[in-house]
Image (cartoon, rainbow, N blue to C red):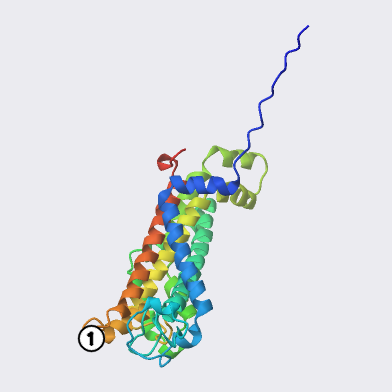
Amino acid sequence: MTTLAVTTPAAVQQPSRVTLVFRYLRRNKSLGIGLAILLFLTLFSTVGQAVANVDKLAYPLAVKPKQPPNPLCIFDDTKKIGKGCFILGSDFYGRDLFAVMAKGLGQTARIGLLAGAIGTFVGTILGFISAYFGGVIDTIIRGVTEVLLPIPVFLIQVLIAGAIDKKSVTVDTMALIVVMLAWMGPTRVIRAQVLSMRERMFVNVAKLSGMSNLEIIFKEILPNLLPFLGSAFVGQVFGAIFASFGLAVFGLGPLREPLIGNTIYFAQYQASFFNGWWWWPLWPSLALVLIFGALTLIMVGLDEIANPRVRRSE
C-alpha cells in the first residue's frame, strides 16, 4: 500500500502594523507628503535648538548683523554657529537667523497646537451636548454659534491684541487670543455629524441594550468621529497659526520673541529687500509655505480617511 503525503499550506504571515501604515501612506499620498514635511520641520526645530544656543542667538545684539547665509561654514572647524558661522545669515538686529528659525518654528507650533487643542476640545463638547441632548441647550448653543460665525474673527482678534499691553503679551497669551472664537467651527461641524449618527441603527441598539448616554457617546459615537475630530484639529491648528502670523505682521504679537510672523514684520519694517538683505524674509516665508502646505495636505488626507467614497484601496 502506498501512503499519500498530505502537505499543509504554510501559515500566511500577516504584515506588521508599521508595514500596513506605510502601505496606506503610499496610497494616501497627500497624508504621507504632509506628514513628511511636518516631520522635517520638527526635526529642523529640534536639532536647531539642540546645536545652537537659541536662548541667546535668537535675540538682538547676539552676533554680527547683516551677514549673508553661508551653509558651507559648518564644515569649517574654526567657526561655530553664531561665531563666524551663519548658516542662514543674520538680520539687522544682530540675530542669527538659524537660531531664530529653530526657536520660531517651535513657538509658532506651540501657538497652533495650544489654540487648536483648546478650540477642538471646546467645540467637540459643545457639539456633542447640542446635538445629542437637544432641547433648550441645543437652541442656545446653535443660536450663539450662528450669531458669532458671521463676525470677522480676525478683526476681533486685532482689537483684543491691540488693547493688551505689549509688555504683557507672551506666546501663550497670543494663543489664548487666537482661540477665543476658534470653537465655533468645530461646534458646528461636530454637531452636524452627531445629529447624523444619533439616528443610526447601532445607536438605537445601544439604547435598547441599556447603555447610558455617556457610554453611547464615548463607546459608540466618539470612535466613529475620530477622523472628523482629527481633521477639525488640524484645521484649527492651521487657522491659529494663520491668525498668529497675521497679528505678528501687524506688530501685535510678542515682538521680542522670534516668531515667524515677527521675523517677517521686522524684515518688512527695515525694508530688507530694498537694502539687499534678501535672506532675512526668505526663510520665514519659506517656513510658512511649508507649514501651510503640510497642514493642507494632512487635512486632505484625513478627509480621505473620513470619507469612504474617496478612499483608495490596495
Quadrant of the image occupied by residue 277: bottom left
- Nearer-the-camera pick, 32 or 114: 32
- Nearer-the-camera pick, 22 or 292: 22
- SS at circle 1: loop
Residue drawn at (40%, 70%) of the image: 241
Q: Mark yes or no: residue 102 visible.
A: yes
Image quarter of the N terminus: top right
Residue at the top extreme? 1
- Is residue 99 depicted above or below 147 in this figure? below
- Image spot of residue 138 (x, y percent): 48, 56
Q: For mark 1, what is the residue?
A: 275
Q: In the visual, does 284 lie left or right of 24?
A: left
Q: Mark yes or no: residue 159 visible.
A: no
Residue drawn at (66%, 29%) of the image: 10
Q: How many marks?
A: 1
Please name the amino acid that badge 1 sits on.
Answer: Asn
Residue drawn at (36%, 79%) of the image: 70
- Image spot of residue 289 (x, y percent): 34, 66
- Image spot of residue 39 (x, y percent): 48, 63
- Image spot of residue 49 (x, y percent): 51, 77
